């Protein structure tokens, strides 16, 4: 393949913290046939550990302190400028702890992904592992979805399910989920960046004929 159609998509990963999902995306993007490159890591926290790690990995970084901007829209316009400067095609939110306005979301409609540590549409919002334990569910997991103005909603690209075990705490359950986050985020990005994923209504169709790559179900330990 050659020319524009085969150009690897330029991805910005937006973080606020440790950046373990960012690492999984960077690692995947370094594989030969991956259809995307991580062109930028942007953080709203100047001291985010993930930001330093991205620099060490040789990736362009930007830090924009949201508190240094007059308001949410000012901050987002600054982000938009940085994304434009880096010719970004796709945005991956990876532990980015800022709510986004409908304006910003509309700039990236169908081009912005988020990872959420629960099987959406269950457990939107924070403290998902604690709430899953409180409810006594036996299956928990994580979701990669396209971002829409409503928080933790939007067409689902990939999910992974994990068992909830008797001795689980929020920490052990969260760690089990996180391991699967690192599997499905690169998978979802690959599906989107390659053009395989299409949004139809609230569904994402990928042309996959088996479920194996879209719903990751690890064998219980
Ligand atoms: C992950 O659990 C992700 O699902 C959520 O925020 C956390 C970020 O973790 N959105 P990390 O910074 O990628 O390690």
Image: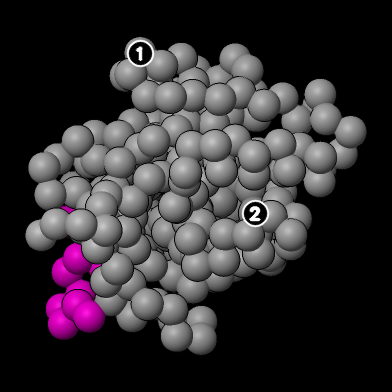
- Is 219 above or below relative to 176? below
The span shown in magenta is: 207-219
Query: Which corner quadrant of the image does residue 175 belong to?
Result: top left
Is residue 218 a member of the stretch shown in magenta?
yes
Query: Whole-percent x and y of residue 132?
Result: 52, 56
Residue 156 placement (x, y as % from top left): 44, 70
Is residue 53 visible in the rendered image? The answer is: no
Secondary structure character of the magenta stretch overall: loop
Q: Nearer the viewer, mark 1 or mark 2?
A: 1
Front-most of residues 120 and 33:
33
Q: Residues within 10 Å of mark 1 (few under 14, many from 20)?
A: few
In the foreground, 165 or 12: 12
Which residue position is annotated with label 2? 125
**Camera-side residue: 87 or 116?**
87
In the rendered image, the quadrant that contains the N terminus is bottom left
For residue 176, the mark is none
What residue is drawn where x is 71% and y is 48%?
99
Indicate which disc residue 56 carries: 1
The residues bearing labels 1 and 2 have C-alpha atoms spaced at a distance of 31 Å
Question: SS class of the residue under badge 1?
Answer: helix
| Residue most extreme to the front | 3
Q: How is the image coloured?
A: one colour
169 magenta-colored: no
**Is 216 on the left-hand or right-hand side of 119?**
left
Crowd rating for badge 2 (residues with CA inside 10 Å; few <14, some 14–19, many 20+): few
- Quadrant of residue 162 in the image? bottom left
Q: Tell me which residue sits at (47%, 31%) in the image.
A: 41
Residue displayed at 33% across by 51% down: 9
């Amino acid at each position: 393949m050659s020319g524009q159609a085969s150009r690897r998509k330029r991805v910005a990963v937006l973080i606020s913290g440790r950046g373990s999902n960012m690492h999984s995306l960077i690692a995947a993007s370094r594989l030969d046939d991956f259809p995307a490159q991580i062109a930028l890591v942007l953080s709203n926290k100047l001291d985010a550990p993930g930001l330093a790690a991205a620099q060490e990995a040789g990736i362009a970084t930007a830090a924009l302190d949201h508190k240094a901007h007059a308001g949410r829209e000012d901050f987002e316009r600054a982000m938009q400028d940085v994304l434009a400067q880096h010719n970004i095609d796709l945005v991956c939110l990876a532990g980015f702890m800022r709510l986004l306005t409908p304006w910003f979301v509309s700039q990236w409609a169908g081009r912005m992904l988020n990872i959420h540590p629960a099987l959406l549409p269950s457990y939107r919002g924070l403290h998902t592992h604690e709430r899953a334990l409180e409810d006594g569910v036996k299956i928990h997991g994580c979701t990669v979805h396209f971002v829409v103005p409503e928080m933790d909603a939007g067409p689902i690209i990939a999910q992974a399910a994990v068992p909830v075990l008797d001795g689980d705490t929020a920490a052990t359950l969260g760690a089990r989920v996180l391991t699967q986050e690192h599997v499905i985020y690169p998978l979802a990005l690959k599906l989107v960046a390659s053009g395989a994923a299409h949004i139809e209504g609230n569904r994402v169709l990928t042309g996959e004929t088996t479920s194996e790559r879209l719903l990751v179900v690890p064998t219980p330990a």
